[in-house]
Image (spheres, rainbow, N blue to C red):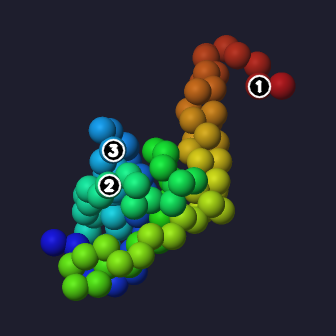
Amino acid sequence: MLPDGTHTAVVDRIEDGIATLEVDAEDGLYALEIAAAELPAEAQTADAVLEITVEESALADVMYEPDETADRSNEAQRRFDRLSKRPPRDGDDDT
């Protein structure tokens, strides 16, 4: 069960009106399923970063974090770009 408090969550997927969130808590990662309608409109997409508040084991608040979403997306693209470069072969000139 997800502990009470404020946590960072990422929308993993939305299927059939259900949003699955990956929630990072102090004691580990959790999966939380909620109605997609409970998310802010701009956060109803995969990889949206949220700040959620849980009180008495229930979701009390959801806030979309657009800057964090953009930062994570940009970092993922940088990693992909780095990995997609062909490594030099023996005999290639690095100049």
Q: Is residue 30 above or below residue 15?
A: below
- State which tag comes first along the sequence, 1 or 2: 2
For residue 69, which quarter of the picture? Answer: bottom right
Q: Around disc 1, counting alpha carbons within 10 Å, would you say few (fewer than 14), some (14 to 19), or many (20 or more)?
A: few
Residue 93 image point, x, y percent: 76, 19
User: Which quadrant of the figure contains the C terminus?
Assistant: top right
Residue at left offset 61%, top offset 16%: 90
SS at mark 2? Answer: strand
Q: Residue furthest right?
A: 95
Q: Residue at x 49, y 45 (%)?
A: 45
Q: For this view, does 48 lie left or right of residue 3?
A: right
Query: Distance between the Cα atoms at labels 3 and 2?
Result: 6 Å
| Vertical arrangement, residue 8 with respect to residue 4, above or below | above
Q: Nearer the viewer, mark 1 or mark 3?
A: 3
Q: Secondary structure at mark 3?
A: loop
State which tag comes first along the sequence, 1 or 3.
3
Residue 45 seen from this side: yes
Answer yes or no: do the residues labelled 1 and 2 have beta carbons within 8 Å?
Answer: no
Left or right: 1, with 27 as reference point = left
Mark 1: which amino acid? Answer: Asp
Residue identifier under label 2: 35
Asked if the residue under mark 2 is in contact with the one under mark 3, i.e. CB atoms within 8 Å, the reply is yes
Residue 56 x/y as whole percent = 22, 85
Q: Earlier in the sequence, mark 3 or mark 2?
A: 3
The residue labelled by disc 3 is 17
Residue furthest top as drawn: 91
Which amino acid does the dot numbered 2 rest on?
Ala
Q: Which mark is residue 94?
A: 1
Name the residue at 61% across, 17% down.
Answer: 89
